[in-house]
Image: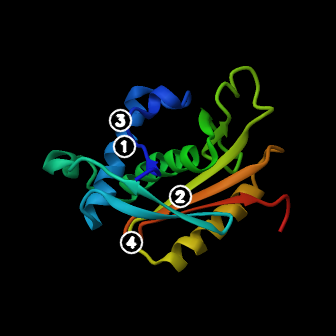
């Protein structure tokens, strides 16, 4: 299949991710995906309502990793970082360039390759969330909440919100309007 969400070696492509952080996020994603599915799966993608599909594969995490990520909320949050950042890379060809500061209404700054090194002028804010178990409608509802969160952030940079539903095999992205 041509479209693949690539969780491997994200630190080599995303300046905002060190090898250790990328590995932890990937491990959490493997935990979340393994709770509901056997690798590989087809993930439904929605970018501002335009649908497509991509393959997502992962390694079985094993019992030690399952114990380390026994807190479902922590695993879902970290796994969502991995999957949504990789999804933005696939869908928009944008890369995580820096972790966002508290109060910005976002988790990461993203931009084209090479952006964000000197300033964030060409970057967007990216607000990320994940849902362990839930329907497509619940993923869409969470996306609307994340759009509102990004809107209330203390930043003048444009924003993008992304949510993955692990059991639903559904990743949604949407540009955040300037106001609602």
Q: Name the element at disc 1.
A: helix
Q: CA distance from mark 4 to mark 3?
A: 23 Å
Foreground tag (1 vs 2): 1
Q: Is residue 23 left or right of residue 143?
A: left
1 left or right of 67? right
Q: Which quadrant: the C terminus?
A: bottom right
Marks 1 and 2, the one that precedes in the sequence: 1
Towards the viewer: 87 or 118? 87
Residue 129 numbered mark, or none:
2
Mark 2–mark 3 distance (CA, rounded to whole Å):
18 Å
Q: Which residue is mark 4?
A: 133
Instruction: Estimate the x, y position of residue 176 in percent, counting from the top left.
Output: 75, 58
**First in sequence: mark 2 vs mark 3:** 3
Q: How many neighbours does mark 2 have within 10 angstroms: few (below 14), some (14-19), or many (20 or more)? A: many
Mark 3, secondary structure of its residue: helix
**CA–CA distance between discs 4 and 2?**
13 Å
> Which quadrant of the figure has residue 172?
bottom right
Q: Name the disc covering residue 23, or none.
A: 3
Q: Vertical placement of 157 versus 56: above or below? A: above
Asked if disc 4 and disc 1 are in contact, CB closer than 8 Å, the reply is no
Decide: is 148 above or below 157: below
Mark 1 vs mark 3, CA separation in Å: 5 Å
Q: Residue at x 69, y 51 (%)?
A: 105
Q: Which residue is mark 1?
A: 26
Label 4 neighbourhood size at 10 Å, few (<14), some (14-19), many (20+)?
Answer: some
Say which residue appears at 42% left-offset and 48% top-offset.
78
Count numbered badges in the picture: 4
Q: Residue 55, position in %: x, y?
A: 40, 56
Which one is nearer the viewer's eye here, 4 or 78?
4
Q: Nearer the viewer, residue 20 or 54?
A: 54
Is any atom of residue 71 visible in this view? no
> Which percent across, then down, holds residue 18?
45, 27
């Amino acid at each position: 299949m041509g479209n693949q969400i690539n969780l491997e070696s994200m630190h080599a492509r995303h300046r905002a991710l060190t090898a250790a952080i990328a590995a932890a996020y990937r491990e959490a994603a493997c935990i979340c995906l393994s709770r509901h599915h056997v690798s590989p799966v087809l993930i439904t993608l929605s970018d501002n309502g335009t649908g497509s599909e991509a393959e997502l594969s992962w390694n079985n995490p094993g019992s030690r990793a399952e114990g380390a990520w026994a807190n479902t909320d922590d695993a879902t949050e970290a796994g969502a970082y991995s999957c949504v950042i990789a999804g933005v890379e696939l869908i928009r060809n944008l890369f995580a360039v820096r972790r966002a500061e508290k109060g910005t209404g976002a988790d990461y700054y993203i931009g084209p390759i090479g952006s964000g090194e000197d300033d964030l002028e060409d970057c967007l804010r990216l607000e990320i969330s994940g849902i362990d178990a839930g329907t497509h409608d619940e993923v869409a509802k969470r996306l609307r909440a994340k759009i509102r969160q990004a809107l209330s952030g203390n930043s003048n940079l444009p924003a993008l919100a992304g949510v993955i539903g692990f059991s639903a095999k559904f990743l949604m992205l949407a540009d955040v309007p300037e106001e609602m």
